[in-house]
Image (cartoon, grey):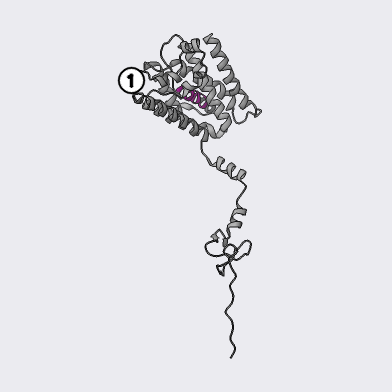
Amino acid sequence: MSEFAPPVLPRCYRHPNMPTGRSCTRCGRPACGDCLQAVTIGSQCPDCIKASRPPATVRAKDWNASQDALITRIIMALNVAVFVWVLIGDTSSAGFGSSISPREVELGLNKLLLSFNHEWYRLITSGFLHFGILHIAMNMYLLFQLGKLLEPPLGRLRYGLLYFACLLGGSLGVLVLEGSSTGLHGGASGAVFGLMGAAAIGMQRRGINIFQTGLGATLMINLLLTFTIPGISIGGHIGGIVMGAICGSIMLPPPQQKQPPWLGYAVPTIAIIGSVIASVIVVG
């Protein structure tokens, strides 16, 4: 009667003291249950899992492509961050009180402040300043809707350039049409109006009647509110929508019209530079 010795199991390549009857389906090395991870077909060891992952640059690119309206979300986050910063300095900034907090004065736009101090950063910071929760809520809602509409076809860089062109166009409109005002101007509505203008032109050039869409009604309602409700910056809204329409007419051509790709970057860049130069001239 013969006796057979029990089979000797191989050891896990990562845990030499751990016998195992399993192995990686990719490299074939023995591995214990703690090391093996289930994949689509079979189980793989940690080294093979790591080796099968795409490079960091590819993963970053894939993540970036999966983010919907990323620039819009970043701009919204900046607006909210500025609002919270102002609110921390003075909690009354949450409402529509008549008083202006020191932090609002630091960021707001007024021609006299530019004339005396030449604080040109106000041309941009005023576009991130909001007077009350309702003010920022309305602007962020419209910004989110318009961003989802415009950012995908334009691409992130061109959309970002368009946004700041509209923002600075709104600031220029304030200086031109409301330069004698002693009030403090702020809000993303100039840029938002610009995006509405660009979207309207883009739809029209594609044969879409905007008055048969939600955009047309939104645009008309906001224009009506601009001219009928006291305290709303007419110059900021008009400047923004004019700048948006100008940029949109070139950046959003009809599908059959071919244009060089660089034009979509050059137009808003020129608009940004031109708005700043014109603002400096207007202030004097």
- The location of residue 137, given as percent across then percent down, is 39, 29
Q: Nearer the viewer, residue 137 or 245?
A: 137
Residue 15 in the image: x percent, y percent? 57, 64
Q: Residues within 10 Å of mark 1 (few under 14, many from 20)?
A: few
- Quarter of the image holding residue 47? bottom right
Q: Is residue 192 magenta?
A: yes
Q: Residue furthest bottom?
A: 1
Please, what secondary structure does the residue beneath circle 1 have?
A: loop
**Residue at 48 percent of width and 25 percent of height:** 196
Image quadrant containing the C terminus: top right
Residue at the extreme right of the image, as rendered: 260
Residue 91: image quadrant is top left
Mark yes or no: residue 106 visible: yes
- Residue 202 position (above or below residue 273): below
Inspect the magenta stretch and tell me whether residue 137 lies in it: no
At x 58% / y 29%, what residue is drawn? 158
Which residue lies at the image location 52% right of the left edge and 31% below the top edge? 150
Per the image, the residue denoted by label 1 is 97
In the displayed structure, 241 sits above or below 214; it is: above
Query: Residue at horizontal 54%, vertical 42%?
Result: 66
Task: Give the quarter of the figure containing the N terminus.
Answer: bottom right
Q: Amino acid at mark 1?
A: Gly
Q: Is residue 52 left or right of residue 75?
A: right
Q: Which residues are magenta?
A: 189-199
Of the pair 158 and 38, the residue shown nearer to us: 38
